Amino acid sequence: MTRSPAHRRPARLRPALRTADLRLGERLLAAVAAFAVAAVPAALLLVLIEAHWAPLHRLDAGAAARLHTAVRDHPAALSVLRTLSDGVWDPLTMRLLVAAAVAWLLWRRAWRLAVWAAATTAASGLIGWAVKAAVARARPALPDPVAHAPGFSFPSGHAMTAATCCTVLLLVLSPALRPVWRRTARAVAGLSVLGVGFTRVALGVHWVSDVLGGWLLGLALVAATAWAFEGWRRDTGRPVPPPLAQGLEPELAPHGPARPEE
């Protein structure tokens, strides 16, 4: 694979790239405001939680009681759920997968996309922690608990991390995958996001509304930062294809240029 050194960039393109990079930084800051707008559904959910809205309360209490009883009575299922929640779908595992994708992007010299992926994932953890501290919602207190977790309950950190990391991975890796593998990756990502939510409620460490809040916040964050990245592509005259179909950087496809950002 041939990589053109940076000094071979046409001189006339360098000022435009520098200007676009500055605008990318501005757009990433603007993405914070966009995130606030995209997170409105999560804010409305929080309002319903704080207002003790009866239908949501019944959903939370009913799901927690039924799933907790079912898991408590089936030790084998409990062991599987613990393995999935604390290992396969643990936030650290998810972030390590993104870190591996970032390393691959750096090897491909897709610097800006690597920064986007790393920044989005880091922001997810910080925002989740901040919202937990601000809301300070207690975790479920169930009789004969089968699992314990530290800290507050809303939003589910596992759910938010899964929604963020799985979407980031899809947007980064889709161009490099054949169509059949792309569909498989989407199925695995969807199963992982849904599975994380199920395990956290079944283990009795989160309410259903905690999981919904985590999903909404994670997807809102990725949507906001992806908007900023697409804006950088427009500033540099690059095409902006549908991100879910071709990823954020379609030039990463095997037949594309080795250095998509030059």
Image (tube, rainbow, N blue to C red):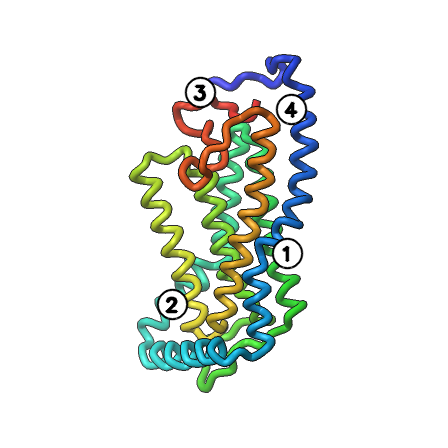
Q: CA distance from mark 4 to mark 3?
A: 24 Å
In the image, is 26 to the left or to the right of 219?
right
Task: Kindly identify which numbered label has been placed on residue 126.
Answer: 1
The disc, 4 or 3, on the residue closer to the chain's N-terminal end is 3
What is the secondary structure assignment of the residue under circle 2?
A: helix
Mark in front: 1 vs 4: 4
Nearer the observer: mark 4 or 3; the answer is 4
- State the CA–CA distance, disc 2 to disc 4: 48 Å
Q: Look at 57% across and 53% down and name the residue there.
A: 38
For discs 3 and 1, the disc positioned in front in the rendered view: 1
Q: Nearer the viewer, residue 136 or 108?
A: 136
> Label 4: how many residues lie within 10 Å, few (<14), some (14-19) or many (20+)?
some
| Mark positioned earlier in the residue sequence (2 or 3) | 3
Pick the residue in front: 239 or 254: 239
Residue hosting label 2? 81
**Element under label 1?**
helix
Q: Which residue is mark 3?
A: 1
Q: CA distance from mark 3 to mark 1?
A: 37 Å
Q: Which of the numbered marks, if any, corresponds to residue 17? A: 4
Q: Amino acid at mark 2?
A: Leu
The residue located at (57%, 30%) in the rendering is 234
User: Of the residues under marks 2 and 4, which one precedes in the sequence?
Assistant: 4
| Mark whose residue sits in front, 2 or 1 | 1
Q: Amino acid at mark 3?
A: Met
